[in-house]
């Protein structure tokens, strides 16, 4: 009987101790003690610190909002510049191709299909580069209209134009064009069509060089 009483007493003591410790934890503040009496001097200091803290947070929020808006405005401006530049570049390329196609039509439309001329003009405008060799550019210009030809074979046909002296440039082109003049395009052999295509590509590249010099 005595053992039961002692055990019960011990249990209640432990329970009371746990409750006290729990209450102490609940009442204990992590940082500072909340001023329950607003009239105390310490309370005034506490609330002043809170106001300053909230004021700083508002300033930071306002600063972040302003900077964010500025950042997004800069992004919008950059995107607008990129879009305008892309549109301008695309417009210039389209205008250049159109001018070159008209030039080729005027010079060769009598004996060469229009689609053939347009394809050469478009490719010439796309790959034109004064720093690249003339032979390589000529081959690239005609590969799309002569897909069955090997690049090496086309380069052989392009040599008279790629390495010609200025005095012989006109002679080479006139010679090629005269050989097929007044003949149907479909009646030309593959090698004749290839030679004419290279001559047209050469003319197109020279026109582009002239356009660039005038720009």
Image (tube, grey):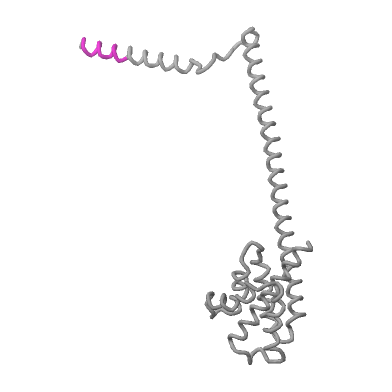
Quick check: is 168 in the magenta stretch? no
Residue at the (66%, 19%) spot, across then down: 52
Please determine whether, in this image, residue 1 is positioned above or below residue 89.
above
Q: Position of residue 208 (x, y in %)?
A: 72, 68
Residue at the (76%, 66%) spot, across then down: 211
Please determine whether, in this image, residue 213 is positioned above or below residue 99.
above
Q: Position of residue 129 (x, y in %)?
A: 65, 64
Quick check: is 5 in the magenta stretch? yes
Q: Position of residue 167 (x, y in %)?
A: 72, 74
Is 3 situated left or right of 96 in this image? Answer: left
Is 10 situated left or right of 207 in this image? Answer: left
Please state which of residues 58 and 173 is positioned toward the viewer in this rendering: 173
Q: Where does the N terminus fall, quadrant-wise?
A: top left
Please state which of residues 169 and 196 is positioned toward the viewer in this rendering: 169
Please state which of residues 65 and 17 is positioned toward the viewer in this rendering: 65
Query: Which image quadrant for residue 18?
Result: top left
Please determine whether, in this image, residue 44 is positioned above or below residue 159.
above
Q: Which residues are magenta?
A: 2-11
Is 26 situated left or right of 48 in this image? Answer: left
Q: Main secondary structure of the magenta part?
A: helix
Please determine whether, in this image, residue 208 is positioned above or below residue 26.
below
Q: Position of residue 74 (x, y in %)?
A: 70, 43
The residue most toward the right is 214
């Amino acid at each position: 009987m005595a053992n039961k009483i002692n055990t019960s007493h011990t249990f209640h003591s432990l329970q009371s101790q746990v409750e006290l410790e729990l209450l102490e934890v609940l009442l204990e503040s992590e940082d500072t003690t909340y001023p329950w009496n607003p009239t105390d001097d310490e309370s005034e200091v506490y609330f002043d610190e809170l106001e300053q803290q909230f004021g700083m947070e508002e300033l930071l929020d306002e600063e972040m909002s302003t900077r964010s808006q500025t950042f997004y405005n800069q992004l919008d401006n950059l995107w607008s510049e990129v879009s305008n530049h892309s549109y301008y570049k695309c417009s210039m390329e389209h205008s250049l191709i159109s001018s070159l196609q008209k030039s080729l039509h005027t010079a060769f439309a009598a004996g060469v299909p229009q689609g053939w001329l347009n394809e050469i003009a478009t490719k010439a405008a796309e790959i034109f580069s004064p720093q690249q060799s003339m032979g390589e550019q000529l081959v690239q210009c005609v590969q799309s209209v002569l897909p069955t030809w090997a690049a090496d074979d086309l380069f052989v046909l392009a040599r008279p134009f790629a390495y010609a002296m200025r005095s012989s440039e006109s002679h080479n082109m006139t010679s090629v064009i005269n050989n097929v003049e007044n003949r149907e395009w479909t009646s030309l052999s593959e090698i004749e069509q290839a030679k004419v295509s290279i001559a047209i590509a050469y003319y197109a590249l020279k026109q582009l060089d002239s356009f660039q010099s005038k720009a």
